[in-house]
Image: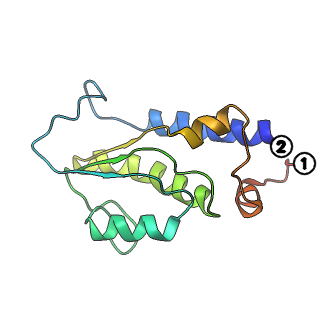
Amino acid sequence: MAFAFAGLLFVWLSALGAAQDAPGDPCNLETPDRIVAVADVHGGYDRLVGILRTAGLIDNRERWAGGRATFVQTGDVLDRGPDSRRAMDLLRRLSGEAPRAGGRVHALLGNHEVMRILGDMRYVSSREYAAFRTVESD
């Protein structure tokens, strides 16, 4: 189960990186536009949505509303809370929507993402496992 879970995470992270259509060096965040950074979501989807709304990055339908802003999620989307999957899915969708409005989303790996990739599942809750379960899961 741990390897399947890590595999799903790897696929998600790969897709998120592929969704970045911004030209140039993705590490160059030099911009005259606004940069918003959020850290340590830890499965707190509702709190993440609240922060993004307050910052004007998403609208009431949870669609990109940040225009040319750059949003940086500094890692640790995973673990401790039950809604990591929802938070990851939101970030993945926003990473595709933002470039169409001139914005960018950068989701970085935190130590909890790296822990998952390495198979360290000590902070994963049973509800979090359930969110990733498919018909093929053990």
Q: Nearer the viewer, residue 35 or 98?
A: 35
Left or right position of 101 against 123: left
> Do the CB atoms of the residues marked 1 and 2 lie less than 8 Å apart?
yes
Residue that sits furthest to the front in the current view: 122
Which residue type carries mark 2? Met
Which image quarter: residue 127? Answer: bottom right
Q: Is residue 98 above or below residue 11?
A: below
In percent of width and height, residue 68 lies at 19, 50
Q: Nearer the viewer, residue 65 or 3?
A: 3
Residue 138 - label:
1
Tell me: 7 left or right of 34. right
Residue type highlighted by circle 1: Asp
Image x and y of residue 41, in percent: 48, 57
Q: Helix, strand, or loop for circle 1?
A: loop
- The answer to whether 135 is drawn above or below residue 53 in the figure is above
Quick check: 120 left or right of 27?
right
- At label 1, counting other C-alpha atoms closer than 10 Å, the crowd grade (few under 14, some 14-19, many 20 or more) is few
Callout 2: SS: loop
- Give how far across and how far down residue 74 sits, in percent: 40, 44
Q: Residue at label 2?
A: 1
Relative side of 136 to 87, left or right:
right
Residue 37 at x, y percent in the picture: 31, 50
Of marks 1 and 2, the one in the foreground: 2
